[in-house]
Amino acid sequence: MALTSDAVLERMMTLHPKIIDLTLARVHRLLEALGHPEQRLPPVVHIAGTNGKGSTQAMIRAGLEAEGKAVHAYTSPHLARFHERIRLAGTLISEPALSALLDECVTANGPDEITFFEITTCAAFLAFARTQADFTLLEVGLGGRLDATNVVERPLLTIITPVSVDHQQYLGETLPEIAGEKAGIIKRGVPVIVGPQTPEGLAVIEAKAARMGAPVLAFGQHWTVWEERGRLVFQDENGLLDLPLPNLPGPHQVHNAGAALAALRLMGMGEAAFEAAVTQAYWPARMQRLRHGPLIDMAPHVELWLDGGHNPAGGEALAATLARLPQRETHLICGMLNTKDVRGYMRPLAGHAADLYAVSIPGEKSTLPAEETRDAALDVGIVAQTAPSVAEALAAVVQRNPAARVLICGSLYLAGTILRENG
């Protein structure tokens, strides 16, 4: 009997622990054993950055598909099921196809060392190379320079979304160091679209682009985007676009939409693509309103939201989004990983939350214990306590205010648990 993809993935995790050791040597070796699928991909858009990669990719995909284009998309991490990471010509990869690909990659790799992300990225490339499409959208997993996705020698274009401090243990302690890692996706002569950056981050990115002879299209210089009278206005050297605001909630999505529109313009798309990019994109666990499932059944009058942001910039974006919502008593249910800047994430949220219920993330070895999450919240001035689970935290809120706003937040891993259990 053929193994299911879950069984193969579990075996891969056992053989190749989830340890991050940034190098491209293992990926190049396996891709060679597989016949170099990375050299046979449809034209590639490669996206790096700290925040906004997934949303920007989702908007570009919505725009391209509105023009009738078939689009491959690769993203990580997944939320509910691994299949979310690989979209073939617009459709999530099937279970039989995924199982067969993973098995093929495990066989080709043999006993050699390789990380989970590296081998699954190779599987995605193999799937993309074997399926007809017009474009391939690749989202970086971590960093850029040594990320497993950074093996395409000549992408169509690259995009660097806002860079902020995160994953310091792998990418460097300072923002210029981190920007340098993200700028590692810039290729010789290939245009790079640059979202809003700090001056020091932009300087690093522009210097790398200059060395590579890569044309730069930077926010504030070559294109700009803003909100005006409830509309999104985008302007570049080709003229002005007047569009609806993004359907993805939050003022930060205006900048993500700007990068997506700059990319679509560069790719030669038209009005249908621009409109769809801002109205048709879907990206789960980014300020997603939950309307069905067991949690809603137990709290039918609560306004329930889910967000997977987990670093200081994510906290700021979340705070700005909450500030735009109609006034309503807001409670946070928060679980985080022990690798994150927890206080930096929570500090912007302090003025928007009545209180916070801290939970440990179920089944996640790297979870921050609920008690430490609670203490971090108390440190930044948020009234906080622990709860054994999200459901029990929600029940406690409902007991006090059945019509409250509740935001489950702090980690994509927590968000994934919620989407699986509340689906």
Image (cartoon, rainbow, N blue to C red):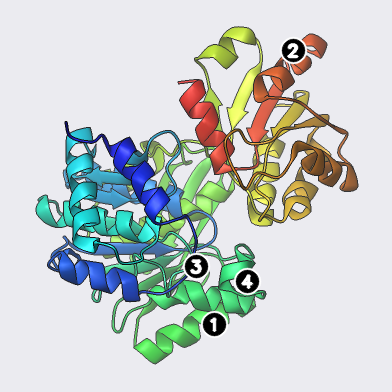
Q: Residues within 10 Å of mark 1 (few under 14, many from 20)?
A: many
Q: In which image quadrant can residue 387 be found?
A: top right
Q: Which residue is mark 1?
A: 204
Q: Residue at x 32, y 37 (%)?
A: 7
Q: Which residue is mark 4?
A: 198
Q: CA distance from mark 2 to mark 1?
A: 49 Å
Q: Earlier in the sequence, mark 3 or mark 4?
A: 4
Circle 2 sits in a helix, a strand or a loop, which is it?
helix
Q: Earlier in the sequence, mark 2 or mark 1?
A: 1
| Residue 390 seen in the current view | yes
Q: CA distance from mark 1 to mark 4?
A: 10 Å
Residue mark closest to the camera, 2 vs 1: 2
Q: Which residue is mark 2?
A: 398
The image quadrant where one finds the N terminus is: top left
What is the three-letter code of the residue carrying label 3?
A: Phe
Q: Which residue is mark 3?
A: 219
